[in-house]
Amino acid sequence: MKEPRLRDTKRLLLIDDDPNLILLVKDYLEFRGYEVLTAENGREALELLETDKPHLIICDVMMPEMDGYTFVKHVRENPETSWIPVLFLSAKGQSQDKVKGLNTGADVYMVKPFEPEELVAQVESSLKHTERLIAHHSKGEDGQRIHVPFDVQLTPTELKVVQHVARGLANREIADELNVSQRTVESHVSNMLGKTGLHNRTELARWAIENSMA
């Protein structure tokens, strides 16, 4: 019997330097209806993320070339990937290890060896949590979506600015991130408000999130 269509659409990125674990986990997740991309270390995974954005990342902690901590730091610093939930897998199961993993930016910390069903349950829980957050941010106080003319086109720089606005950064912080003046950022925000017909930065951020720009 075919799995539900919603699960068919979910793409996962599995990162581990153990080929046996990659094979077993990939087969199990694909059997459950997920599409699974794989990488052997954090550096390879970052290259993959440049062209493909998964719905969730499953990542080993201790890996050659780039470990899980460094990889997640890069994921969280990039506006295009910062929203992706990350599930850490690690043979290190002490409390301080779990705390470090979660403080680094992981959403879930699982200790090896683990039961496949538990992994699937954590994956599904994380995906549902992300969907609830997106649904919450996509609604205003009146529960309605932001409406903007369908033909609005943003320049590449405007797109970068609105991604930072959606992250909650102030104009001064965005200017520092993009290495431009604060006045330039204010000009881009003003132009986008004019294009979209929106009234403020909050509505601009909601619009960006609703339309998967952030």
Image (spheres, rainbow, N blue to C red):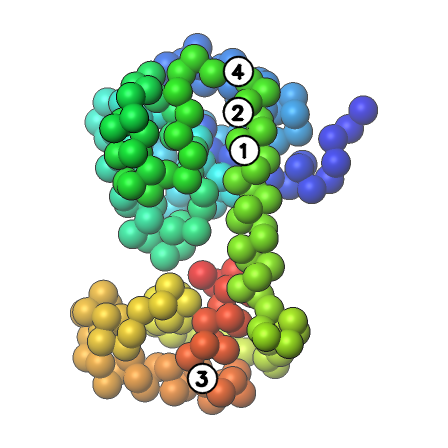
Residue 119: assigned label? 2
Q: Which residue is mark 1?
A: 123
Q: Which residue is mark 3?
A: 200
What residue is drawn where x is 47% and y is 16%?
114
Q: Residues within 10 Å of mark 4 (few under 14, many from 20)?
A: few
In the image, is 201 to the left or to the right of 102?
A: right
Q: Nearer the viewer, residue 201 or 153?
A: 201
The amino acid at mark 4 is Glu
User: Vertical placement of 148 versus 15: above or below?
Assistant: below
The amino acid at mark 1 is Val
**SS of the residue at dot 2?**
helix
Q: Nearer the viewer, residue 38 or 105?
A: 105
The spot of residue 72 in percent (x, y) is 31, 40
Q: Residues within 10 Å of mark 2 (few under 14, many from 20)?
A: some
Residue 47: assigned label? none
The amino acid at mark 3 is Asn
**SS of the residue at dot 3?**
loop
**SS of the residue at dot 4?**
loop
State the separation of the CA atoms marked 4 and 1: 13 Å
N-term-proximal mark, 4 vs 3? 4
N-term-proximal mark, 2 vs 3? 2
Q: Which part of the image, by quadrant, shows the N terminus? A: top right
Residue 14 seen in the figure: yes
User: Vertical placement of 122 versus 188: above or below?
Assistant: above
Can you name the residue that lies furthest to the top here? 20
State the separation of the CA atoms marked 4 and 3: 48 Å
Q: Which residue is mark 4?
A: 115
Q: Residues within 10 Å of mark 3 (few under 14, many from 20)?
A: few
Q: Which part of the image, by quadrant, shows the C terminus? A: bottom left
Residue 15 seen in the figure: no
Residue depth check, mark 4 versus mark 3: number of the one nearer the observer: 4
